[in-house]
Image: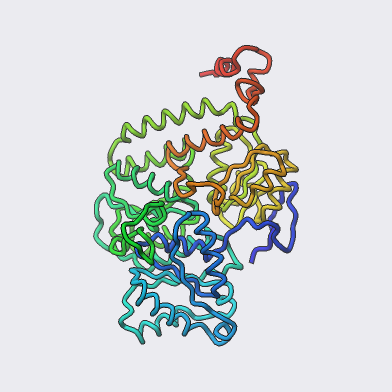
Amino acid sequence: MTRLGASPTLRPGAVAKACAINPLKMSQPLGAALAFLGIERAMPVFHGAQGCTAFGLVLLVRHFREAIPLQTTAMNEVTTIMGGGDNIEKALLNIYERAKPAFIGIASTGLTETKGDDVDGELRRIRSDHPELTVPVVYVSTPDYQGAFQDGWAKAVTRMVAAFAKRAPTVRGLVTLLPGGHVTPGDIIELHEILEDFGLEVIVLPDISGSLDGHVPDDFSPTSLGGTKISDLYRIGASEAVIALGEQMRPAAQMMTAMTGVPSVVFDTLTGLLANDRFFSYLSALSQRAVPLKYRSQRSRLVDAMLDAHFFFGGRRVAIGAEPDLLWTLSTWLQGMGAAVVAAVTTTQSPLLEHPLMAGTHIGDLDDLERQALAQGCDLLITHSHGRQAAARLGIPFLRMGLPLFDRLGAAHRVLVGYRGTRELTFEVGNLWLAHDPESGPHGHTHCPAAGDRGGDPILACRLDVRP
């Protein structure tokens, strides 16, 4: 278990403490449940008390503003002590009979993990006693007193890879995409379009863009409304390549390669000019096709947007509270734009935290983030909706990012990946600073050193100083 504030280096304003104040992280079971929701006609189940499930359900409903199918094994005081095997059996049989799911995903909670239920053993017994229960069932251990949201997502995807990946003859042009838990349904739609424009067939695991993209179904369904088809899950071993997005997905990609022999590649971010140049170069080599003109044009527009916006980014000081992969995505992009991330708090351990760019980042809460932002004199606060009060107290612009986002519409449709997503993010952040201080930037105070003593248009002044 990671103690809050534990880190080799604490930034100014960080305080080591024994409890969370205004928590930043979401739990592992919630991440696993969201991953299971990316499977078509799925029913996620929390192995724990009803309250655990209700709390997670509220978070997902508020974020996506959709009906979320989520069930529970309804553990109580007696069954927790005596063992939850009977509760798992009853839950599975009831769900199978009433909801008719094509897939059931079970995530443990702190309650049953503390008891130490042998869920895998119970599932083998249930299968033996009830041969009519033919639906695929995947169990993942996700104690909510350890790790965080992206850990639960990553573990669930890894268990699904282990359950479905089999060696098969390679299908030319078939690609499996493993998106991280920080990727939105809008991001997946964008990536799906990009891959198809290179002539590739893509299986997304899990595909929350099919189930949580906000569409209105023709008929009511007690299960997820879309996502990765079960038939496609059994095809992932025939892929020509596995593309993972986010460091959290490296274990799943490595397992896929070990089980099927399919080569895998991990992209730590797809936000930013250089990151997307690498991604599109990889797709061009994989597909043996030139980058479509559509994306060459998008790249040109992004470069122009960066030129227009960099006056508002240069020298800015930013505070970010986010899951490690999202924190990395935002930090690398902001620093590429000339801003400095001077306060950073995350939720769980990650190899990314060892990178020099993440020096001083520690696991903590929103109270830590607010203290650091105040000590460092930050110009922007980035975190999920629970950070809005801190931003108001600090008197600085606030960019809502991550999960949950419950005080704004369209969280599921946000796009941060690709040239287009990066351009939209660039405008969004630049406009936040403009709205907060209309006198900043090229038409007032500027961060461009060349504009200070030349007079006239500071944009022209800066551009005249550019050397070949």
* Residue located 58% across and 80% down the image: 115
Image height of 162 relative to 304, above or below: below
Image height of 67 relative to 354, above or below: below
In front of the other: 156 or 397: 397
Position in image of residue 353 (x %, y %): 60, 51
Image height of 301 relative to 178, above or below: above
Position in image of residue 388 (x %, y %): 64, 47
Res 138 quadrant in image: bottom left
In front of the other: 331 or 226: 226
In screen coordinates, is 46 left or right of 314?
A: left
Position in image of residue 174 (x %, y %): 28, 52
In front of the other: 63 or 458: 63
In screen coordinates, is 240 left or right of 429?
A: left
In screen coordinates, is 198 left or right of 435?
A: left
- Is residue 35 among what the camera can see? yes
Position in image of residue 156 (x %, y %): 45, 64
